[in-house]
Amino acid sequence: LTLLSNYFRRSCHRVSFYFFSGTTKSEDRAALLRKFNEPGSQYFIFLLSTRAGGLGLNLQAADTVIIFDSDWNPHQDLQAQDRAHRIGQQNEVRVLRLCTVNTVEEKILAAAKYKLNVDQKVIQAGMFDQKSSSH
């Protein structure tokens, strides 16, 4: 996240962006989110980690989500994607995932895909009827 932030500061002078991580104070987060989501906002990019920004945020002004720090828990990444799929979203949302070949990132992504597959086959497909499971 810091690398991307430094890159944007040095190389993309015309692109305005916000950044927050786990160390950003909650009152600062709220102000950043409000400014980012304002109609006509000049801020084009919002950099945040999936753990710091994956839950409870409203980023309906965003139409592209780029995940570059895949989590071992695939539901964390799904939550991060859902931050842009909010009430008020008027655009199609694109989700891109960055992954470097032959690194631990690739193993994390493979494990996450496997976990989602198991979740779909076992948990989601086996939704229990409340009548039959309560006895």
Image (spheres, rainbow, N blue to C red):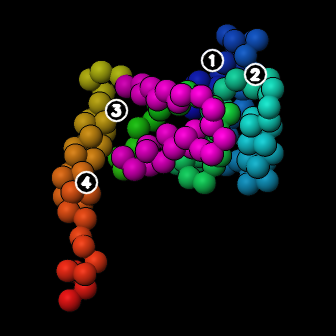
Quick one: 28 or 55, which is closer to the camera?
Answer: 55
Residue that carries the numbered disc 4 in the rendered image: 119
Mark 3 to mark 2 CA distance (whole Å) = 28 Å
Which label's residue is closer to the chain start, 2 or 4? 2
Q: Which mark is residue 7?
A: 1
Question: Which secondary structure lies at badge 4?
Answer: helix
Question: Which secondary structure lies at badge 1?
Answer: helix
Give the residue at x 59% y 24%.
Answer: 4
Quick one: 1 or 135, which is closer to the camera?
Answer: 135
Which label's residue is closer to the chain start, 2 or 1? 1
Q: Position of residue 132 (x, y in %)?
A: 20, 80
Q: Position of residue 31 (x, y in %)?
A: 81, 45
Q: Is residue 82 magenta?
A: yes
Q: Which residues are magenta?
A: 74-99
Mark 1 to mark 4 CA distance (whole Å) = 37 Å
Mark 2 to mark 4 CA distance (whole Å) = 39 Å
Which label's residue is closer to the chain start, 4 or 3? 3
Mark 4–mark 3 contact, CB under 8 Å?
no
Q: Residue 108 occupies which quadrant of the picture?
A: top left
Question: Which secondary structure lies at badge 3?
Answer: helix
- Dot in front, 3 or 2: 2
Residue that carries the numbered disc 3 in the rendered image: 105
- Give the amino acid type for the residue marked by disc 2 in the picture: Ser
- Dot in front, 1 or 4: 4
